[in-house]
Amino acid sequence: MTNMILVPDKLALATERNVQPAVHHQPNGFSDRFALGFTKLLRFSADRLFAKRYGHRAIVLETVAAVPGMVGAMLTHLSCLRRMRDDDGWIRTLMEEAENERMHLMTFIEIAKPTWFERMMILSVQGVFLVGFSILYLVSSRTAHRVVGYFEEEAVTSYTLYLQEIDEGRSPNVPAPAIAKHYWKMADDAKLRDVVLLVRADEAHHRDVNHGFANKLNGQPDDPALVAAYPDHASEIRLHV
Ligand SMILES: [Fe+2]
Ligand SMILES: [Fe+2]
């Protein structure tokens, strides 16, 4: 059902909105409840700060979203070195997630320009979040991946609401930025709406991957068939090499 996320038509969007609550990991135990509670607290803060300014919201939150993948990749890498064991492909998956989130940022910076207040907020939030998430990952990587899974559930919801803003004419459906057309291999006449659909599909993929990692660390079965499809991305991400 989650794979419909890639189908860019109104019916699919309506269906996706309706199935949203179904794509939710039911918290099980303290670790999951902590992860969900922390996510809801951040969601509440983001809602107060940005309301419906989705372009600005995307920029600030993508600067945060690109941190966990890199922290998880580095700490998993160091742990594999110490234990002299295989990573099961986790390191590259997490580095790819970090790069993908940074490309979301590079895309939305072409759509909206952050205010000075937002730039200051990005600086301080990065410091606090980097330290906090690294400690959490060292204490419980299972909880850390669950936090990212829940963050991504919220990201999917936010981008669904952004699509609604565009569809109802409150956000202009401007042409897609050149960097987005290159990265997602989009048509020349692609619009912002097409970009948001692909960003949302990326987030749905990260959501399922991170919930899967948390399940695995919890000794539960991890079914790769349940992971939402990942859009195709350019292998050389820079526009001008
Ligand atoms: Fe993102
Ligand atoms: Fe994300």
Image (spheres, helix red, strand yellow):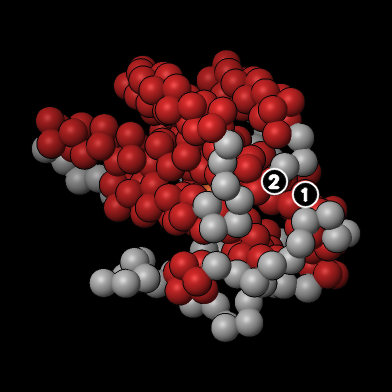
Q: Residues within 10 Å of mark 1 (few under 14, many from 20)?
A: some
Q: Nearer the viewer, residue 119 or 181?
A: 119
User: Could you tell me which residue is drawn at 69 percent across and 67 percent down?
Assistant: 174
Q: Is residue 205 visible?
A: no
Q: Which residue does the image show at 37% across and 71% down from the upper left? A: 239
**For disc 2, does the CB lie below 8 Å from ligand 1?**
no
Whether label 2 touches label 1, CB < 8 Å? yes
Which residue is under mark 2?
54
Which is nearer the N-term, disc 2 or disc 1? 2
Secondary structure of the residue carrying tag 1 is helix
User: The C terminus appears in which quarter of the rendering?
Assistant: bottom left
Tag 2: amino acid? Tyr
Which quadrant does the N terminus fall into?
A: bottom right
| Depicted 33 relative to depicted 149: above or below | above
Q: Position of residue 66 (x, y in %)?
A: 43, 42
Mark 2 falls on what kind of element? helix
What is the tally of numbered marks visible in this picture? Answer: 2
Q: What separation in Å lies between label 2 and label 1 (alpha carbons)?
A: 9 Å
- Decide if residue 83 is on the left or right side of residue 132: left
Q: Amino acid at mark 1?
A: Leu
Identity of the residue furthest to the bottom in this view:
188
- At horizontal 36% and vertical 66% (from top left) the residue drawn is 237
Residue furthest out toward the front: 116
Residue 121: image location, x then y, percent: 52, 26
Q: Residues within 10 Å of mark 2 (few under 14, many from 20)?
A: some
Q: Which mark is residue 161?
A: 1
Residue 117 showing in the rendered view: yes
Q: Which of these two is toward me, 62 or 30?
A: 62
x then y, percent, for residue 13: 79, 63
Residue 163 image offset from top left, x and y in percent: 76, 57
In the image, residue 29 sits, relative to residue 148, either above or below, namely above
Question: Residue, x 62% and y 25% (percent of image)?
Answer: 42
